[in-house]
């Protein structure tokens, strides 16, 4: 559904600069993902949540870094908030996810976290 | 998880005395969860340091940055270029993170901003209780899930000392005797036989830093070694 973005408080240039640091790796990773779902069972959170597809490492990576790349960093706080839930609530960054093609999923999720942090979006353990 | 406590601000100010450009690095791991060394706390500490420095009429550049975990090499990589701009690092991670940081950036002084206190549990928001001292010889199965190393002031492995003070420890009337609690728990479970088992003393002396390799990975790492 179309939603008018409120980009106040978000520095898209800064997001783009961070994305650019890993552009080659990110582009290749996004392109290489074959949606094979073989990474799924290497994620203990996926297994522990009745194999909910939203916990699949590929889902988390495509819906965080993938979205940031596709939108060229033009996201608002709401987008980043959704991303925060994805990369912190559904991932503990244990770095154990396995991709048969060799995509470094933890590195991509860490990149998404770094971007969220750069915009002041991160978990507030005393408020949640 | 690991629990830590912020150092007194004066101690941190003393540590950064003499440095012009300081990077305060937070950790998104355990210290973030126990509300002492995450991104929010980095911002708060930087603001506090700046106020103190301003009052004293001292000019310094203090910046903040938070990595996902300071105890994992792959997350420290993103600091490689950034760190070159600074002449001192303040780390808000646990002792492991601080050492890891100091090892990777060995040419720059690294100062801890927190005291690593324990491995503990969350009692309530902002309230944590020590539960484990990582002694490397877990006997919880025989002590009813109460750790004698952590809970007993003397870390006794085989029953209480002679100083048991009613139901409490001889060091304080407010600290319950660990071995009395172990006795009660085992009695409740009808397992008092376990308390009679004698364990050899812990070899605290000769302890060197422990590196563990999980069994399925032994072939991988030990073959390389």
Image (tube, coloured by chain):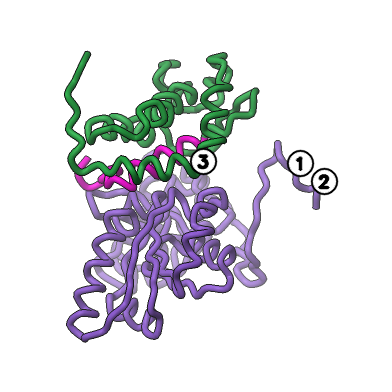
Chain colours: A green, B purple
Task: Write the start and end of the magenta stretch as one range.
Answer: A106-128
Residue B15 against residue B35 in the figure, above or below? below
Secondary element at tag 1: helix
The residue that label 3 is drawn on is A22
Q: Can residue B182 be seen in this view?
A: no
User: At x 32% / y 35%, what residue is drawn?
Assistant: A84
User: At x 31% / y 59%, what residue is drawn?
Assistant: B36
Q: Residues within 10 Å of mark 3 (few under 14, many from 20)?
A: few
The residue that label 2 is drawn on is B223
Spatial CA span between label 2 and label 1 = 6 Å
Residue A81 x/y as whole percent: 26, 34
User: At x 40% / y 61%, what residue is drawn?
Assistant: B25
Q: Quarter holding the N terminus of chain A?
A: top left
Q: Nearer the viewer, residue A55 or B205?
A: A55
Q: Nearer the viewer, residue B107 or B92?
A: B107
Spatial CA span between label 2 and label 3 = 34 Å
Q: Quadrant of residue B172?
A: bottom left
Q: Can residue B37 be seen in this view?
A: yes
Q: Which chain letter goes with mark 3?
A: A
Magenta stretch encompasses residue A114: yes
Q: In which quarter of the image is residue A121?
A: top left
The residue that label 1 is drawn on is B220
């Amino acid at each position: 559904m179309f939603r008018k973005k409120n980009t106040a408080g978000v520095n898209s240039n800064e997001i783009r600069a961070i994305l650019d640091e890993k552009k080659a790796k990110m582009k290749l990773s996004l392109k290489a993902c074959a949606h094979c779902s073989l990474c799924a069972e290497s994620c203990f959170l996926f297994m522990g949540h009745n194999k909910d597809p939203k916990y699949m490492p590929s889902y988390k990576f495509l819906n965080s870094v993938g979205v940031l790349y596709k939108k060229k960093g033009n996201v608002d706080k709401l987008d980043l908030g959704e991303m925060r839930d994805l990369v912190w609530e559904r991932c503990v960054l244990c770095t154990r996810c396995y991709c048969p093609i060799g995509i470094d999923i933890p590195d991509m999720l860490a990149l998404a976290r770094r971007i969220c942090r750069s915009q002041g979006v991160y978990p507030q353990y005393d408020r949640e | 998880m690991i629990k830590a406590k912020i150092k007194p601000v004066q101690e941190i100010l003393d540590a950064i005395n003499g440095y012009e450009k300081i990077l305060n690095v937070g950790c998104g791991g355990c210290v973030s969860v126990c509300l002492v060394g995450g991104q929010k706390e980095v911002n708060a500490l930087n603001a506090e340091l700046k106020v103190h420095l301003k009052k004293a009429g001292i000019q310094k550049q203090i910046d903040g940055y938070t990595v996902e975990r300071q105890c994992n090499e792959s997350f420290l990589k993103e600091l490689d270029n950034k760190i070159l701009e600074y002449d001192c690092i303040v780390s808000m991670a646990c002792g492991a993170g601080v050492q890891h940081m100091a090892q990777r950036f060995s040419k720059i002084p690294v100062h801890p901003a927190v005291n690593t206190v324990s491995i503990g549990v969350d009692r309530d928001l902002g309230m944590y209780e020590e539960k484990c001292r990582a002694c490397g010889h877990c006997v919880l199965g025989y002590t009813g899930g109460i750790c004698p190393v952590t809970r007993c002031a003397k870390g006794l492995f085989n029953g209480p000392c002679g100083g048991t003070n009613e139901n409490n420890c001889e060091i304080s009337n407010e600290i319950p005797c660990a071995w009395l609690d172990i006795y009660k728990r085992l009695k409740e479970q009808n397992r008092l036989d376990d308390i009679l088992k004698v364990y050899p003393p812990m070899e605290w002396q000769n302890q060197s830093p422990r590196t563990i390799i999980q069994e399925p990975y032994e072939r991988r790492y030990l073959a390389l070694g």
